[in-house]
Amino acid sequence: MKFVFVQPYGDARLSAELAALAERSSWDGFFVWEPVWGFDAWVCLTSAAMVTERIRLGTMITPLSRMRPWKLASESESIQ
């Protein structure tokens, strides 16, 4: 990947808009932060996946120590 957009904060609607714009602009990836307080990164990535086709999606940081392993496994599997 050469060009990646990183969204530091925002809700699912903003994520969808920015991911679609990044894809139309020929960017290679769209990533979001996993905040301690704020919008869930997996929800934001799901909304981005609904409006894109080829762009790569992911999180910049997923703090595994504060997540239940089964919750992270089910969320990350369902986004692929």
Image (spheres, rainbow, N blue to C red):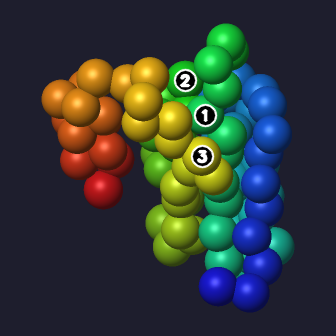
Task: Say whether residue 37 is visible.
Answer: yes
Q: Is residue 62 left or right of residue 1?
A: left
Name the residue beneath numbered marker 2.
40
At x 57%, y 70%, the residue is 55
Counting the numbered discs, the total is 3
At x 68%, y 15%, the residue is 38
Q: Earlier in the sequence, mark 2 or mark 3?
A: 2
> How many angstroms separate mark 2 from mark 1 (CA)?
7 Å
Secondary structure of residue under mark 1: loop
> How many angstroms separate mark 1 from mark 3 (CA)?
6 Å
In the rendered structure, are the residues bearing label 2 and label 3 in contact, judged by CB atoms less than 8 Å apart? no
Q: Is residue 40 above or below residue 21?
A: above
Task: Say whether residue 78 is visible.
Answer: no
| Furthest residue toward front | 65
At x 81%, y 73%, the residue is 25
> How many angstroms separate mark 2 from mark 3 (CA)?
12 Å
Q: Which mark is residue 34?
A: 1
In the rendered structure, are the residues bearing label 1 and label 3 in contact, judged by CB atoms less than 8 Å apart? yes
Quarter of the image holding residue 1?
A: bottom right
What x and y, as percent, mark residue 52? 55, 58
Q: Residues within 10 Å of mark 3 (few under 14, many from 20)?
A: few
Q: Which mark is residue 12?
A: none
Name the residue beneath numbered marker 3.
61
